[in-house]
Image (cartoon, rainbow, N blue to C red):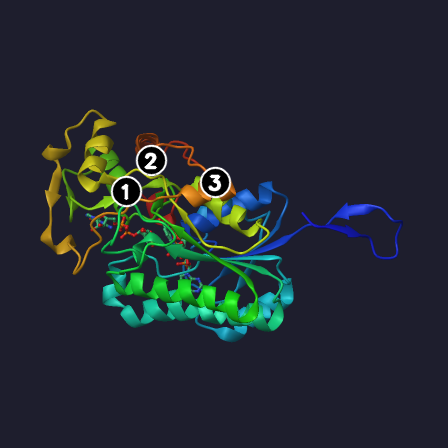
Amino acid sequence: MRIEREAGGPRRAMLKQKTALITGITGQDGSYLAEFLLEQGYRVVGMQRRSSTETLWRIAHLLDKIELVQGDLLDQLSLIEIVQAYQPDEIYNLAAQSFVPTSWQQPVLTGEFTALGVTRLLEAVRLVKPDAKFYQASSSEMFGKVVEVPQNERTPFYPRSPYGVSKVYGHYITINYRESYGLFAVSGILFNHESPRRGLEFVTRKVTHGVAKIKLGLARELRLGNLDARRDWGYAPDYVQAMWLMLQQDQPDDFVVGTGKTHSVRQLCEIAFGCVGLNWEDYVVVDPALFRPADVDLLVADATKARTVLGWRPTVSFEEMIELMVDADLRLLKGEDVPPGMVAPVLRRGI
Ligand code: NAP
Ligand code: G4F
């Protein structure tokens, strides 16, 4: 934290509370990052886009501790006004259209949010608060059809979806603003990270929620796509700490963040069904409609730089994470107490 003198007062040093602005605060990572920054003593401001329906369920337990402000990555003026009004010390750009299959259905909108949205926010920083530290949520999807295994900061990109292409743009525009204007702008190339707050459309949560439904007699099968795809899956609360650590360095730099271990969707099913004593092969149905036009076959991180420079390490194994997600989904469906930030309105109605 920066030590500053109190203006006009006695010459005693005081700690100035830092302000963090989070775009995408209603998402999985935004909710965990908000919790983490509050624990560190930050004033947390979350940018939320206007919606006619409730999107606050992941941060419902934080609403009396954070400030929400309306803005949209599509709207340049709203971004400028928010940065002007709150003068954040740190800005975490987590907002994006983040679901890969949707990026083929809405490629232009994905580019507007996930690619150009980054430039709009960087422009607001450059014009209004150039000394703010800026974090961009880059993605291992940028490695796509990987040219080497494992992937590190120097691995060339080969994106396989409009989402991946948009993230490559966001990644390079962040580096460009760092090099052109001297902004403290960094990119975290984060591999897949999951939790009980993950959206139901992503494969880990789709599986753990599906397992819980089958175990409770609420479903008879689980339809999935490519079972051979392999991912480096970690635990989301660990990953938001890496974001923060990147902004605490003396020099801006980019980091790969992942566990270094990879599992297939098939192994995910084995482990998740195993948690409730079921055999996955009795329930999983492969549905060709769920295959992607082009998939990413294998991701596995070489996070040596994050380990050595940031001192970052994952604390929860894949097996532990899947077990805690299955357990949370069972509780949710049984109407028992669930971890904070988990109860979506639609699930509360038992749909
Ligand atoms: P998420 O749960 O899908 O959250 C995305 C957030 O972006 C939501 O808060 C959403 O708001 C907001 N958003 C979308 N479009 C917006 C717009 N036009 N203006 C303002 N806000 C908008 O994603 P996540 O898993 O937390 O991921 C956070 C970031 O990390 C994303 O950029 C994602 O691409 C990236 N990333 C994620 C992973 C991962 O494994 N989770 C890995 C690498 C990178 P609504 O609630 O209104 O929809
Ligand atoms: O869980 P997924 O949808 O995650 P994906 O595509 O890897 O993207 C996630 O991680 C990225 C980081 O690498 C983020 F940047 C991105 O925002 C997002 O958070 O799919 C994982 C794999 C894919 O290969 C997919 O083909 O699982 C395979 N899969 C097989 N059946 C399925 C399904 N994926 C989904 N969503 N649903 C299925 O039924």
The residue carrying pointer 2 sits among few (fewer than 14), some (14 to 19) or many (20 or more) residues within 10 Å by Cα, namely many
Label 2 sits on what residue type?
Met
In this orientation, does residue 32 appear?
no
Between the C-alphas of marks 3 and 1, the distance is 29 Å
**Closest to the observer: 209 or 154?**
154
Q: Is mark 2 within 8 Å of ligand 2?
A: no
Residue 236: percent from left, percent from top: 41, 42
Image quadrant where residue 269 sits: top left
For label 1, the residue is 204
Q: Nearer the viewer, mark 3 or mark 2?
A: 3
Between the C-alphas of marks 1 and 2, the distance is 9 Å
The residue carrying pointer 3 sits among few (fewer than 14), some (14 to 19) or many (20 or more) residues within 10 Å by Cα, namely few
For label 2, the residue is 325
Mark 1 vs mark 2: which is more N-terminal? 1
Q: Which of marks 3 and 1 is in front?
A: 3
**Given contact means CB atoms under 8 Å apart, are the residues at marks 1 and 2 in contact?**
yes
The residue carrying pointer 1 sits among few (fewer than 14), some (14 to 19) or many (20 or more) residues within 10 Å by Cα, namely many
Between the C-alphas of marks 3 and 2, the distance is 30 Å
Residue 49: percent from left, percent from top: 46, 64
Q: Is residue 128 above or below residue 324?
A: below
Q: Does the residue labelled 1 lie within 8 Å of ligand 2?
A: yes
Tag 2, which secondary structure?
helix
Tag 3, which secondary structure?
helix
Mark 3 vs mark 1: which is more N-terminal? 1
Label 3 sits on what residue type?
Thr
Label 1 sits on what residue type?
Thr
Q: Is residue 260 above or below residue 48?
A: above
Residue 40's label in the rendered image is none
For label 3, the residue is 308
Which residue is farthest top? Answer: 277
Residue shown at 46% from the left, 64% from the top: 175
In this orientation, does residue 249 appear?
yes
